Every structure is written in structure tokens, then in C-alpha cells.
Image: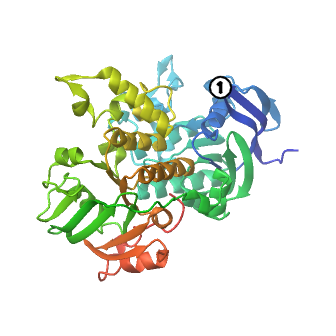
Amino acid sequence: MSSPDELLRIEGVRKAFPGVVALDDIDFDLRRGEVHALLGENGAGKSTLIKVLSGAHRPDRGRILVGDSATVIRDAQDAARLGIATIYQEFNLVPDVTVAENIFLGRQPRRFGFIDYRRMESEAAALLERVGVDVSPRAKVRGLGIARLQMVEIAKALSLNAEVLIMDEPTAVLTTEEVERLFAIARRLREEGVGIVFITHHLEEIAALADRVTVLRDGRSVAHVDADTPEDELVRLMVGRSIDEQYPRERPDAGEPLLRVRGLTRAGHFEDVDLEVRAGEVVGLAGLVGAGRTEVARAVFGADPYDSGTVEVLDRPLPGGDVNAAMTAGLGLVPEDRKGQGLVLDASVEENLGLVTLGPTSKGGFVDLAGQRASAERIAGDLGVRMSSISQHVRTLSGGNQQKVVIGKWLLADSRVLILDEPTRGVDAGAKVEIYRLVNELTASGHAVLMISSDLPEVLGMSDRILVMAQGRITGELSAEDATQDAVMSLAVAAGPRSSTEENGVEGHHGH
């Protein structure tokens, strides 16, 4: 029996596509004036569920109740009529018209048969004020940043008098400040009685904003819990594994040193850095934001210059500031900013996998396309990249699958030493475990991995040794046995006082 403040309910909904059951007997309900978080790994069924609610997919069986009555949502118009509005990660806005025209697209107020621009702009201004965004209704949408585009989408939803607002990972591309603003708006809408379905994989956002959580796993709703459920319990529900099983590190015996760095110094960035990574080993590089870890990685790889010191790969000295020499020597770098530096987003999976090997696989100046394609197929298969084909654009893959493509391009290039900078940032819990398994396979086959990470449980769970940096220097080394969060943190603040802005750089939880 539904409660009087129930806005919508889904009972026993199933949706299958050729070869895959996306939703299997899902139950979900949303109450007036609540934020209900939907949590699950990529492929758990969150997107399909939203598409069923927004009219993009029709369920094969089960029923949807809006208010007290069973209903069929055939398309977006049906959803809008029922008061359901969805804000997708890819916004549905027309770039070359104004904010006001976007808000009332297809429903512009009219007077004597003509669009009443004055009324449309004043109504748009009132909606924009309600969502607390300082933008002119006459501004063209093309010139707005992501956060403002999102607020325009919310204003558009409110113009439809939406009682149900579905937000699909709305914080994925926002800064901390913008996230705060978005949460303030969500709380205000909740007070006004709007029900919000909130999808995120940042667990700390659930505690900050949500009232209840439904966890999806493999297309089923496996749990309905309160938002104050501890993070590790939420992770366990999502992945069906305990925390210990999330870092499946297998530690082979370490072989000879593949990477040796001695006395590496770049004035103002880092000084006198010594490190070595042996075959079969994962060495973690931990520290607070601004400690100099990424700068060291980029200098080792030749992307940035350094003033003094030496880098050797497989006992051969590398010239400084020469990326091609580093790649030829067998060094690979998976950068922190995979979208900006690791991938060509508008190119295919195949083209991205071949970025490093185009030179070596060409014969007499011609690229061996068939060989390149076969290699790309093989590596994408080995890594389990989820895609329709290797011609699919990388932009359309999930974060975890994009990251596998970045790693895959170095495997194709046969890099013996791989530097991973924040390898699982923005990647869901299931894809994380797949990336860790990949790291295990690399080290089992004699590769060496230097892993920079701000996620402390990850550093502790996956490293064989941990080097800690503070203010551009290595302040200590810990073995896997001796390493604890406290031991790492005390070394991370070892080099004297830090500025308060940098204190939160190491994440000591499982949220990311």
C-alpha cells in the first residue's frame, strides 16, 4: 500500500536487450520531499532505470505507479506530463539560442499568436533566481560553463512543474564550490516538496545530501538503506565483496630494478628524489596534494625538464625532457588527467590504443592497419573494455573503460615500466577492481609499476612498498607490512608546517 506522500513507485520492472538483462525485477519508490540516491557500479542498471522513468525505454514487464495510479510512460512528453524531469550528463540544450528560449523550448508563452518574449524572459528570470544562478535569460547557452548549463536544465525542469527530478551524476564535472551550490538548490527543492532521484558514485555525497539509498547490482535492487549507512557497507552492497577483497594484490617476488631515479631535482618543485622500482613490484607514491608526486612522474617520463639527477630504465640512462626516448626505452605514463592528456576523446578505441605504436608498426612509412586492428582487438579483449566495437568513440565509454584504454595503449607498446598517476580517480568500484587485477597481471609478467594515488586505502592495499613525499622530498619508505594510514600520514606531513588548503589532499576513505 503506498503512503500518501509517495510520488512514484516501480514494482518488479524487467528490461532486457539482445544478450543482456539490464533490469531484473527492480523495486524502487520515491517520496515527496526526499533525495533518494541510486547507487551501483557501471552496468548495474542505473541508466536503464532512469530511461524507463523518462520514457526512453518501455519495460518488458512490471509496473510504474505515479501517485496512486499505474501508468505507461511512452516517451519524454508522457514523462513531462506526469511531472517527471531528467537531467542527463549530456545536456539537452540548444547552444545557439538564449537561456529563456531553452527553458521554454516548444512551450513558449504566446500573445496574439506570436511568442511573448517579454513574458518568457521574466518567467525565465524568476526560475533562474529560484535555482540561484546569476545568468541573464537573454544569454546564449553556448557561452555558459558546465555548472550554469546544469542550473539552466534544473530551471527548465521546474518550468514543467516537475515533482520528480532525476539527476544523473550531476556532480561528475563540477568543482567543489559548484557541488556545494548544487546541493543547496537540491535541499531547497526538497523543502518545496520535490522528490529527487540522485545518481552518484561519490559515496561522501550520499551522506551529505541523500535521505535514502537504493543499491543496484547486476540489474537487481539488492538493498534499500538509510543514507547514513557506513561507506564500506555501501561498497560491500554495491560490489558484493568486502573491503579486503577490493584490493586483490598478489605479490610476486621482485626481480631486478627496471627503473632507477637518483638525485632528481627541479628547483621549486622537487629535490634529491631517489627511487627504484623492480620487476614484479608495485611501488606506491603517497603524499598530500602539492607534495610534488605528479611533477616527479612527469620529469621521469621526460614530459617536464629537470635540473639535475639521473633516470635509468633497464640499466640505460635516459636523456632528460625526451618523451620519445622514454617511450622507446620502455617507459609508459598513465596521466592523472586521462581526458586531457591520456586520450583523444573524439577518436575511436582502436585509434587511441594505437597512439603509441603507430611509429613502430609502420613499414616503409606506411602504417600496418590490419596488424594495428588485430592488436587493438586483442588488447581490448584482454582488458575487458566494454564497448560496442573498437570503432566506438572513446568519449562515449565509461570512466573505467576509458582508463583501460589508456593502460592498454602502453601494453600494446610493450612498456616494461608503467607510471600510473591516480589510476582509479572517477572510476566506479567494479572497474577499480578490474584495474587492480590488470596491475597484478602486469607485475606477474615481470613489469614494474610506480603508482601515485591520493586514495590511501588503495595505496595500502596495492603497493609492495610505499614512498611518501612531502614538499618535494621523499620523507620515508614503508614496507607493505609496516604501512598504516597513520604511518603514511605522519610522513606526509613530515617536512614542516603545511598550508591549510593542502591538508585534505589525501583521502583516507573509500569514497573515490
Percent coordinates x, y for residue 219 in the rendering: 69, 39
* Foreground of the two, 104 or 12: 12
Name which residue lies at 64% across and 51% down. 239
- For the residue pair 273 and 38, the one nearer the viewer reads as 273
**Residue assigned mark 1:** 19
Q: Amino acid at mark 1?
A: Gly
> Which SS class for mark 1?
loop
Q: Quadrant of the N terminus?
A: top right
7 over 205 or under it: above or below: above
Residue extending furthest toward the top: 113
The answer to which image quadrant residue 343 occupies is: top left
Tell me, yes or no, if residue 54 can be seen here: yes
- On screen, residue 385 above or below 443: above
What is the crowding at mark 1: few (fewer than 14 residues within 10 Å), some, or many (at least 20)?
A: few
In percent of width and height, residue 317 lies at 16, 57
x then y, percent, for residue 241: 65, 56
Residue 91 seen: no
Q: Is residue 117 left or right of residue 292?
A: right
Name the one closer to the observer, 179 or 161. Answer: 179
Horizontal arrangement in the rendering, residue 261 relative to residue 490 (left or right): left
Choose between 86 and 362: the one closer to the eye.
362
Give residue 413's position: percent from left, percent from top.
Answer: 31, 39
Q: Residue at x 45, y 34 (%)?
A: 380
